[in-house]
Amino acid sequence: MTRRFHRVLAVTAATLITATGVTAAATSAAAAPPSHSSAAGKGHLAPARPGTLLECASLVGFSYARTTITSAALVPAGTVTNAGAPVGEHCQVRGEMNRRVSPVDGKSYAIGFEMRLPRDWAGRYLYQANGGVDGTVVPAYGNVTGGQLRSGLQMGFAVLSSDAGHGTPTPDFGRDPQARLDYGYQAVGTLTPMAKKLIAAAYGRGPDRSYFAGGSNGGRHTMVAAARYADQYDGFLAVAPGFNLPKAAVAQMWGAQQWATVATGPNLETAFPKEQRQLVADAILRSCDGLDRLADGMVQDAEGCARAFDLDEAVPTCAAGPEATCLTAAQKEVVERVFAGARNSAGAELYSPFYFDPGLTSPGWATWKFQLSVLLDPGAVGLIFSTPPTDPATVGGPRNYALSYDVDTQYGKLFATDGTYRESGMSFMTPPNPTNLDTLRTRGAKMVVAHGVSDAVFSAKDTARWYEELDRAYRGKAGDFVRYFEVPGMGHVSGGPATDQFDGLGAVVDWVERGKAPDRIVATARGAGNPGGANPEVPATWAADRSRPLCPFPLVATYKRGDVEDAASFDCKKSSGKVASVPGAGHGGGRG
């Protein structure tokens, strides 16, 4: 059964994204240094120049169209810490833009924001794109990946964070057409020129270099900004990007329907409980761990594993009911369907497949698949992404909405418009043309994308497909300006049995300003004692500081020789597609 789904993995999904919408015209407050780029996608831009904070409290009087600054105050050094280290003195500015009353739901809306401006400035600006459905002004520390040891603020960035145009982290704002558009992309276009002007007021000049970074929905924001606002930003970091978020949310609910067919009670996790997920994870390791020439409890070659692993052959079938040592035939069918990606009754693909990866044992994986699929996704699909909107509360609640959602008749609402909602969910939530990054490329900007192979909600395969399409569009030269890195074992944004701590933002800066392309990014396990916070899912048999290279897709980390816990013992190579019989550390790992 599984092999036919592996053939599906090789098929590139057609892009179903419309190109309607408004691109905001934003201009920098001060001219950036000239580009040193000798050709599109190559070379580098001039490095940012450091500066010193000149104004703080007086910024409360900052004047910009439809903008109110509500507070501006110095934050002493050490008041904020990150990874156990003090953050330096900085100015915290809070405010809002475009206060209005909706003609549709009668509620008051504004784009709330916070900026943190370090006294010792690196000459750089960072748009911190936030996750979920936004609705909260997350502190503008510039934390964009799990367990990050250096925040953007610590690196000297002037950082902006916003609520994306609505003041509560719930999907109710989807009733207002403008709030939808602000959430999708227009808040970014509105905030960017204001932020650069405010930076100029604080430092006496605007930023030399501007960056954009985020994970999950923040990764989606990043990829949308790379397509819509590349004239305003020099570097982009997208982690676990849900750039096809409406489709992914529908796939979540479709998956819940599949799990419900074999669940033994209301809890959907009874369809595929932890002990059985561990059984499958062990089978994945037996089939795929050796693809990188080392049995270390990690599958570095996700594409090779998609070809090598067969659920039907690798996992015993229960003769009677489900047990910890086997799966029933019905369970196997459901697991295969979910991993093969959501489809309608005619067999047409609605969202990309998922990789089989041992990270499916993670509690986070189960939370996304079995709980949030019937709690979080229904509201987003019904109220934000569909036209006209439907409140799940009016049709029996979110769980009932998810389990009764008919993809044959309702999926089209993601692409629909009407007299009130003039832009579809797929239009305002996704890049207008995801494989056209001409502006980014031509001006010498760069983008790094990273995605956990075991992400349960946004498929890493979906991102891999995007990169393959991008590379074809640029005749094999996409790597000159965009690089995609898969993180084995990592779940959604962070976590899982993985080396999930890495400096993606630093890699982007080095590429943009120094011309140092990221041929590998070293990632470390967050074992016990990690200053950025320990990851409880790091196996006890691994070194607490195990490191691995993240390799630019489609290359994979391959063991050569030396300490099995050290990234220096691995090269980035093309997949051999073969499981090598090479002595290793066993599935648990350990120094050798």
Image: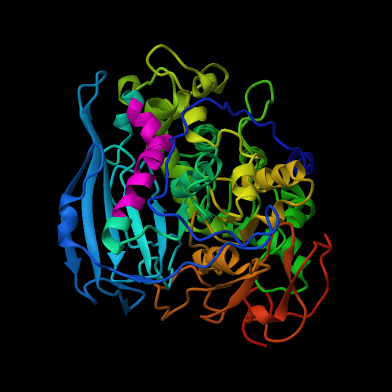
**Residue 394: image x %, image y %?**
31, 20
**Residue 118: image x %, image y %?**
30, 68
Query: Is residue 71 in view from this perspective?
Result: yes
Q: Is residue 180 magenta?
A: yes
Q: Is residue 73 left or right of residue 113?
A: left
Residue in view at x 40 percent, y 71 percent = 50
Q: Is residue 552 left or right of residue 410?
A: right
**Residue 373: image x %, image y %?**
45, 39
Vertical comparison of 573 with 233: above or below: below
Q: How is the image coloured?
A: rainbow
Q: Is residue 44 left or right of residue 138?
A: right
- Along the line of sight, the residue nearer the viewer: 454 or 131: 131
Most extreme residue toward the top, as rendered?
419
Vertical comparison of 15 with 288: above or below: above
Q: Main secondary structure of the magenta part?
A: helix
| Magenta highlight range | 178-198
- Along the line of sight, the residue nearer the viewer: 516 or 231: 231
Query: Is residue 498 in view from this perspective?
Result: no
Residue in view at x 57 percent, y 78 percent = 546
Question: In which quadrant will I find the C terminus?
Answer: bottom right
Q: Quadrant of residue 146?
A: bottom left
Q: Quadrant of residue 189?
A: top left
Vertical comparison of 415 with 497: above or below: above
Q: Is residue 359 magenta?
A: no
Question: In which quadrant will I find the N terminus?
Answer: top right
